[in-house]
Amino acid sequence: MSFIPFIRPAVARNLMSQIWNRLVSNVGVRLVQVPLLLSALGQEVYGHWLVISIVPAWLTLLNMGTGTVAGNAMVMEVASGDIKAARKTYSDAMSVTLRIIALIIPLLVVFIFILTSPLLNGLSVARRSEATMGLCLLCLSVLVTFISDIHATRLRAAGKADMAAYLLGAQLWIELVFILLAILIAPRLDLLGAANFCSTMIYAIATLLMSRRAIPGIRYASRLSDQTGRKSLLIKGFVFQSFPLGHAILLQGQILVVHQTMGAASVALFSTARTLVRLISQGLEMVNHAVWPEMSRLFGQRDLNSAARLHRTSVMTALFLSAAGALSLWFAGPWLYAQWTHQMLVVNHELLLPLLITIPAGALWYTSSMVPLSCNAYDGVAKRFLAAALIAHLACWWMSMKIGLPGTALSTLIADAIMIPYVLRRSLSLTGDQPKGLLRRFISDIRNR
C-alpha cells in the first residue's frame, strides 16, 4: 500500500523528472553557481548582476502565458481523443508566439540601450559595457524560450511531461559548464550572458526534435490558425500572466526595494539568503509540476473523484514537506549559508525566521492552485493574486524602511493571507469536494489505497 495515493505511473514518472529538474539540477546548479559567481565577481558586482537579471525576468511576462494555456488545453484535448483540436491549439499558440516576438524585438532594443542606465549606476565604464551586452544576450535567451515553451507543450500533450522536465534540468547543467568556461576565460558579464544564451539554444533544438518525434500528429499549420483561436488564447494568456507578474512583483520587486533602500551589498545578502530558503519551495514544486499534467488529464476525462483525491493529497504533502524543511533550516540554515558562501556573507535568525515563515503559507495556496490552473479555470485566482502582490509590494517599501531586511521578507505574508481562503474554496468547488471533513477524507484516502 502506497503512502501517497495519487502515485500512478504517469505521476511517478513526472515526480522522478521533477526531482531531477528541481532538486538535482535547479538546486544543485544554484548551490554551485552562487558561490562561484560571488567569488569571481565580488559582492558588489554580483549584486549589480542580480539587479540586471531582473529585466529578462520581467520580459518573460510578455509571452502572455501562451505555452501554459495551450499546454493545458492540448492535454485535455488529447485525453478526450480530439487530436485535430490539439493540432489547432498548437498552431494558434505558435502563431501568437511568433507575432509577440516580432513586436518585442524593436521595443527591446530601445529599452536596453536607452532606459536601463539607472540599473547600471555604480559600475565602471568597462563593466557597464559588459552588462549591456550581457543583458542583450539574456533577453535574446528569453525570446528563444518563448518558442521552446510551445515545443514543450507537445511533449505534455503526448504524455511525456517528464521528458520536458529532464531536458530543462539538463539545460541548467549545460549553462553551468558554459559559465565555468566563461570564468576561466575572464569573469565578464557579457560572457555570463553568452553562457545562458548558448544553453538556451541547445534546449530549444532538443525540445523541437523530441516533441515532433513524440507526437507527429501535432504540427504547426498556418491554415489551422484563425483569429478566433488566437484571440481566445491571448485573452486566457493575458489573465494567466497575472501569476508570473505577481511573482515578479513579489520576488524581483523585493530586490528592487532592497537595492533602492539599502544598496547592492544588501541585495547580495538578501537574495542569497532567500535563495537558500526557497530551496524548500523548489522541492515543493516537484509535487506541483508532477501533479499538474495528471490533473489536466483527469479534467479532460471528467474524473472529478480522482481529481479531488489528487488535490487533497497534494496539499497535505506540500504542508508536511514545507513545515519539515522550514524546521530543518531554522537549525542548520546559518551554518549551511556560511559554508555555501565560503563565509563571505553571514545570515542570522532575525532574517532567516521571516523567510522561513513564508514557505508553508505559500505552499498551502500555491499547491491548491494547481486545480484551477490545470483546467484553465484560474481567472479569479489570477486577478486576486495580482492584487495581493501589489498590496504586499506597497507594504514592502514601508516594512523595509522600518524593519530592514526582515521586514522585506515578512511582506510576502500579506499576499499569502489574501490568497489562502479563496484558492482553497475555489479548488474544492472545481473538484466537487467540501471543506468539512477534508482531513478525515485525506486519512481515508491513505487507508483505502
Image: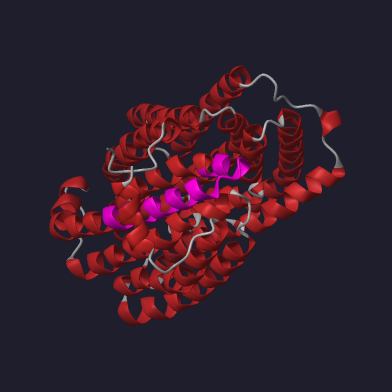
Towards the viewer: 428 or 168: 428
Q: Position of residue 345 (x, y in %)?
A: 21, 56
The residue at 70%/53% (across/down) is 236
Q: Position of residue 116 (x, y in %)?
A: 58, 56
Which quarter of the rendered picture does the N terminus lie within? top left
Q: Where is residue 309 in the image (x, y as percent from the top left)?
A: 43, 50
The residue at 42%/81% (across/down) is 398
Q: Where is residue 22 in the image (x, y as percent from the top left)?
A: 37, 40
Q: What stretch is highlighted in magenta?
A: 295-321
The residue at 52%/44% (across/down) is 295
Determine whether 179 is above or below 401 in the image. above
Towards the viewer: 414 or 393: 414
Residue 342 lies in the magenta-colored region: no
Residue 318 lies in the magenta-colored region: yes
Q: Can residue 277 be seen in this view?
A: no
Q: Is residue 302 visible?
A: yes
The residue at 24%/64% (across/down) is 352
